[in-house]
């Protein structure tokens, strides 16, 4: 339990840390997307592919 909480709290603000660049293709992730999707690791394109299970 405590371990899960510690893993979720990656930043002092309490939000999971969002990647500045897409983990898949390296493209910059727009600030708006990072704010809208806390903890996102992919750009919109790669996220869409990821959700389709193609990555
Ligand atoms: Zn990408």
Image (cartoon, rainbow, N blue to C red):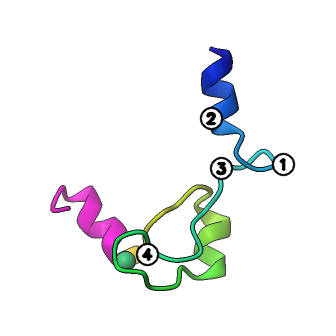
Quickly name the residue at label 1: 12
Q: Is residue 22 left or right of residue 37?
A: left
Quadrant including the C terminus: bottom left
Q: Is residue 24 placed above or below 10 in the rendered structure?
A: below
Residue 27 is situated, as x and y percent measured from the top left of the image, at: 44, 85
Say whether marks 1 and 2 touch (CB < 8 Å).
Answer: no
Q: Is residue 13 placed above or below 2 in the rendered structure?
A: below
Q: For the residue labelled by badge 4, is the local secondary structure a helix, a strand or a loop?
A: loop
Q: Nearer the viewer, mark 2 or mark 3?
A: 2
Q: CA distance from mark 1 to mark 3?
A: 9 Å
Quadrant including the N terminus: top right
* SS majority, magenta: helix
Q: How many numbered markers are drawn? A: 4
Quickly name the residue at label 2: 7
Give residue 16's mark: 3
Give residue 43's mark: 4
Residues drawn in magenta? 45-55
């Amino acid at each position: 339990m405590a371990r899960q909480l510690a893993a979720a709290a990656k930043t002092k603000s309490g939000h999971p840390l969002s990647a500045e660049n897409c983990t898949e293709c390296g493209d910059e992730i727009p600030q708006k997307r990072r704010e809208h999707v806390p903890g996102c690791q992919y750009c919109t394109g790669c996220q869409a592919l990821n959700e389709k299970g193609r990555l």
